[in-house]
Image (cartoon, helix red, strand yellow):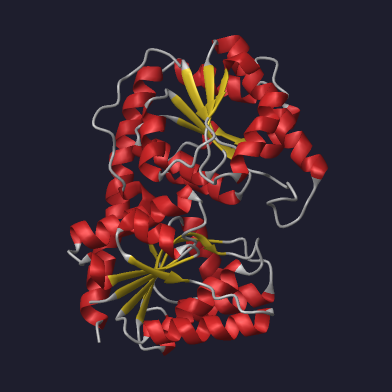
Amino acid sequence: MKIGIIGNYGHNNNGDEAILTGILKQLIEELSIPNEDIIVFSNNPKDTEQRYGVRAVPIFHRKGPLPFSIMKTLKENYLIMRNLDVIIVGGGGILMDLYKWDGPLYATLGLLGHYAGCKVIVYGVGVGPIETKLGAFFIKQLSQKACCISVRDEQSKRLLQALGVKRDIHVIGDPALYLAAPNEKQESHFVQKVAVTAVPYYNGKYWPTSNEQKYSNYVTGMAKNLDQLIEKKNVAVTFFSTKYPQDVQVTKDIAALMKHRDRVTIIDKNLHPNDIVSLCASHDLVIGTRLHSLILAVVARTPIIGIGYHPKVYHFLSLIRQTDRYVSVETLGMEPASIVQIVEKMEKKWLDIQRETRQIAEQMKEKAGEGIELLRLSGEKHVR
């Protein structure tokens, strides 16, 4: 069985790379698919091949004006897909149009696989926001042509149903939850080391629309909250990125506004998913704005607090029943003690919370493992 994987890979977004790592681990280790029978459609094929030891091809071919690039992309990828049995549209928040071309691009490539004769599996994706008719149209079309659909949370399932998708939609764990956990996670008696991620929220160099006031409120709010945490709990703060290098500048902007910059370390490196798991395991708490910093912290069995820049952060905390550890981006600016108040509540039952996090990690890996059976059944049933 020859398999192609489509997603936001090869963009130095190590949340997405964690998803790909999890999918490949499931295919190779659990389903015994040979490496040479897997192709990843990547934004940086050379990097993807070096990382994973599988073949990679460009997901998008640039050739002059956009219409020519689209035609070149469809032609080249169709020829490749003709030699595949299964296309996995895999993981991440790719069925959305916050970035207006994401939903149409990934949905179109999935549809292309269908018309090339492949069976298409929509696998562990996040859905939404969907705000344009174009995005809604392509996402619905993909959902209707797929032989199997699975999403990573109930909210994504409801969004597809609201589009009029009447197929069975399975809810599984994010494939990144299938990454290997560290050998041993030592319990701590209180919070001492805190790892933090930030996202360039409404920064014009990254966000689809620029709003410098919102960005300023966000970084100022984060700085004040972390200063309060340092003052009240005497913690050390480590900033790290899952999207490199874009997230590094945000952390530098936050640190520049902090009174206690001497208690801050910024990791200016492109950490791969397994490195992020190890980093999270070496800290007592992860305060994550990036969704996959939270997911990989759970893999590492490290307690989390989520900063809600996007609905998917709340959705994940809801999935693991920890919405009491959620802070919206807007709250950060208005309540500089919002994070430390959550930490103080957590420390009252800190040993219990650490043990609960281990249980959640095991449960969520099992939930991610449910996708393996979907892949197996879909592959066996639908191979040409």
Query: Where does the image place residue 94, in percent across and percent down from the top left?
Result: 52, 63
Q: Quadrant of the N terminus?
A: bottom left
Frontmost residue, 11 versus 92: 11
Q: Position of residue 373 (x, y in %)?
A: 24, 64
Is residue 151 visible in this depiction of the protein? no
Q: Relative to 233, does residue 71 appear above or below in the rendering?
A: below
Which residue occupies the extreme left position in the image?
32
Q: Is residue 302 left or right of residue 231?
A: left
Residue 103 appears in the picture as rendered: yes
Q: Tally the numbered discs.
A: 0
Report which quarter residue 262 is drawn in: top right
Spot the residue most to the right: 213
Quarter assignment of residue 131: bottom right
* Residue appearing at x 48%, y 42% in the figure: 270
Residue at x 50% of width, y 87% of height: 75
Residue 41, relative to residue 188: is it above or below? below
Identify the image quadrant of the C terminus.
bottom left
Q: Is residue 43 above or below residue 235?
A: below
Foreground pick, 300 / 58: 58
- Residue at 33% x, 59% y is 23
Which one is nearer the viewer's eye here, 260 or 298? 260
Q: Position of residue 97 (x, y in %)?
A: 63, 65
Q: Position of residue 65 (x, y in %)?
A: 69, 80
| 260 lies above or below 145 | above
- Point 17% across, 64% down: residue: 32
The quarter holding residue 164 reads bottom right
